[in-house]
Structures are given as C-alpha cells and as structure tokens.
Image (cartoon, grey):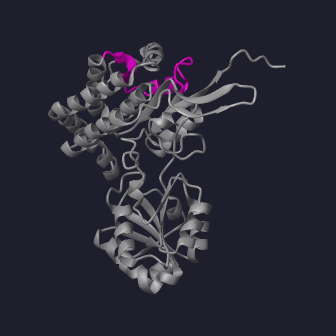
Amino acid sequence: MLDTVKTEDVKSVMATIGGHAKSASQILATASPEAKNNALKIAAENLWQTREYILAENKKDIIAAKTNGISAAFLDRLTLDEDRIKSMMDGLLAIAELKDPVGDVITQWDRPNGLNISRVRTPLGVIGVIFEARPNVTADAGALCLKSGNAVILRGGSDSYHSSRAIHACLVSGLKDAGLPADSIQIVPTTDREAVGEMLTGLDGCIDVIVPRGGRSLVERVQTDARVPVFAHLEGLCHVYVDKSADLNMAIELVVNSKMRRTGICGSAETLLIDKAAVDTHLQPILEALAKTKCEIRGDDEVVAIFSDANSATEEDWTTEYLDSIISAKLVDGIEGAVEHVQKYSSSHTECVIAEDSAVVEKFFNEIDSAILLHNASTQFADGGEFGMGAEIGIATGKMHARGPVGVEQLTSFKYLVRGNGQARP
C-alpha cells in the first residue's frame, strides 16, 4: 500500500508539515551560503552513490505505470537512467555554484533629503510544488528552493511515488549533514488527493507560493482552487517559424531537433509555420526530414496539396500540445502571417524564428509576447539548466515577476531597506 497516511488524518498531517516548513523557512532565510551549498554538494554525492537503489525504485514506478497504460510521453518523463541521475547530480552542483541571491542588492539610490534606499532580495518563504510523473522535479525543486532560502513541500504523483522518495532521501541527508533543518525539504507522505486540496488552501498561511508541474487538468485545478499565488503554465504550445531568408540546412536541423529530440517535454515544437515565399525551396526538404524521423505531419490544405504524406489538419490541431511525434504545419504570409497565427494560438510559452533577415527577427521579438523567444536556436533550449540556472522549478507563462524558467532569482521577492540619519517627514 503506497499511502502511509489515512484519509481522515490528511488534514492534521498536512497542517503539521506546513508548520514545520514555516519554522524551517525562518532558519533558511538567514542560513549561510556555505551551509546551503554544502547541503547541495552532499545531496549530489548521495544521488550518485545511491543510483542503483534509485533506479530500482524507479523500476517499480515504471512497471506500475505500464500496467496502467501510461502514454509514451508520460513514460519518458517518468523514466530514470544513469545519465538522467547524473544530470540531476550535475544540476545540484551547478546550483551550488550559483551566486546566492538572498541579500543581493538589486539597486540602491539616495534621496535629496539624505535617505539611502536599497532594494534587496529576500526569500518567498514556503513553496508548495505539486507534480506528476517527473521524479527529477524532486531534486530540481528541492535544490532551487534551498539555494534561494525557501522551504519546500513536495507533493509528487502516485506514478513517481517510489522514485521521488528515493531522491528526497538524498536531499534530506544533505541537509542534516550540513546542519540545516531536515524539514527544509519535505515530501507529502501520501498519494491521497486530499493532500493537494490542503496545500491549495495555503495550510493556514504557511505556504506562500504554489508551483504545479503536470498536465492541463492538474494546472487548471491549481489555478482555479489555489488561495495563494501560483507560478504555472497550462501547456507548451510552441511554434517554429521558418522565414524565406532562413538558411535551409539550419532550418532542417533546428525544426527536427525542436520537435523530435524529446517530444514529451513542454519545449517541444508543436506547430511549424513556413513562409509562403519559401515553398519552392524550404517546405519539401523540411517536411521530408521530419517524415524520416517518423514524425506525423498534419498540414493545412496548401501543405497537404504539396506534401502528399501529410494528413489534413483540423482547427483543433492548432491548439493541441501533442507531446508526441506529431507536428502541425501551415503556410503563412511571411512574418506578418506568422505573428498573427502565434498571437491567436500560442500558450505564451516558447516560440522560435529561423531567419537571416534582421528586420524579420526584430518584428518577431517585438510583437510576440511569449515567455521565451528564440532566434536560430531549437525550442528544446527552453529549460532553466540550458539558461545557466542549474535547473528550473518550472516555466511560468504569466506576467508576474517570475516568467520563463523559474530559477533561484525568481524564487525571491525583495524588501526595501531605508537608511537615514534622523530625517523626519515635514
């Protein structure tokens, strides 16, 4: 039996977890960078030393998931191997090497009356992370929250139950060995969905921010029911636009990589837009390259008329995050048509323009307001680790202070420190 907490006890257990997290956050807020970094380094070493045990626990999750008829994309996110464990380890070490954001002076200025005002980074407090089938989130979220001086409450899905707990144990041992509160990184000890509901209430003011990582239904529930701020995106409906000025070889490589490197991640391209002026030069070679990778192409009428292996796209295709070897393709009237399509259908996650014309790139960057915009680079770079953040707790598509990959800086707020020498306001 997976659950270690009975349904009727969930409320009291979650209240206890919240209280412990709040107490731990007060200690973490003033913890030294050395202590936090030491905890991360020890946790990284523990991950690698216990990798065989972690893989054995992950195998339990995979067997159960296959029995339940899990999708290929879901299975890809759930599966761990030595390379992925090493990536988690490297992520912890990279986060340890980052500049500590707590206490960082963002800006400061003097007023004519002699007051000195500074804006200083401060932790958010307690962060609740609710995730599905992504055991690596345990390491990423735990490490990022610790580095930024926040306590975290992790609630993983039943699909990653064993994997997440094995990873969590490594983080806790790092905390203990570094002399930091073990309650700084807690994991909810039950798969009972009532625990999610309790977290969304804020646990009587203990949780300051919620971060959901999962499918549309989970994120929609969190955004609807949460009584605390949420960093979230519903889906990654990412677009790639190939302009007539694009280098053909580059376009082929980037389109295939954006779609097929890993189809189950939110940075995978779902819609391909090609300039009508490039039909004779770019369309056929790009679609042929995709087809060779066994990617299904769903095109508009013009694409289907030219590329016989394409299936006809419906209106639903332009709003679908496939997370699979499928891409929708459309011909557009240059950069104007591309911008119009993206503005209509985008989920504000990640978009890419492949072009050599600087005016096209400038228009794309200026008129599209997604969280991440790329020029001549794969959409698969939409990742905090690739941004030099060590890892990410998620990619936020809202317009609050945390947008795009959420790393250590985005997990802080700020306060104003005002220094005077006796000023009284007249």
Residue 399: x and y in percent read: 60, 45
Q: Quadrant of residue 324?
A: bottom left
The N terminus, quarter of image: top left
Q: Which residue lies furthest to the right in this view?
A: 426
Quarter assignment of residue 105: top right
Write the residue at 37% across / 27% down: 191
**110 left or right, relative to 271:** right
Does the magenta-highlighted stretch encompass residue 196?
A: yes
Above or below, 107 relative to 169: below
Above or below 136: residue 204: above
Is residue 140 located in the magenta-colored stretch of the structure?
no
Question: Nearest the camera: 202 or 365?
Answer: 365
Q: Is residue 135 visible?
A: no
Residue bounds of the magenta highlight:
179-208
Q: In which quarter of the image is the C terminus?
A: top right
Residue at the extreme bottom of the image, as rendered: 280
Percent position of residue 304, x then y: 45, 79
Q: In this view, does 146 lie above or below 330?
A: above
Query: Residue 320: where, in percent of width, then height?
Result: 49, 58
Residue positioned 27% across, 23% down in the render = 174
Query: Could you tell me which residue is drawn at 39 percent across and 64 percent down?
Result: 326
- Percent position (x, y) of residue 323? 39, 55
Query: Residue at left 42%, top 80%?
Result: 282
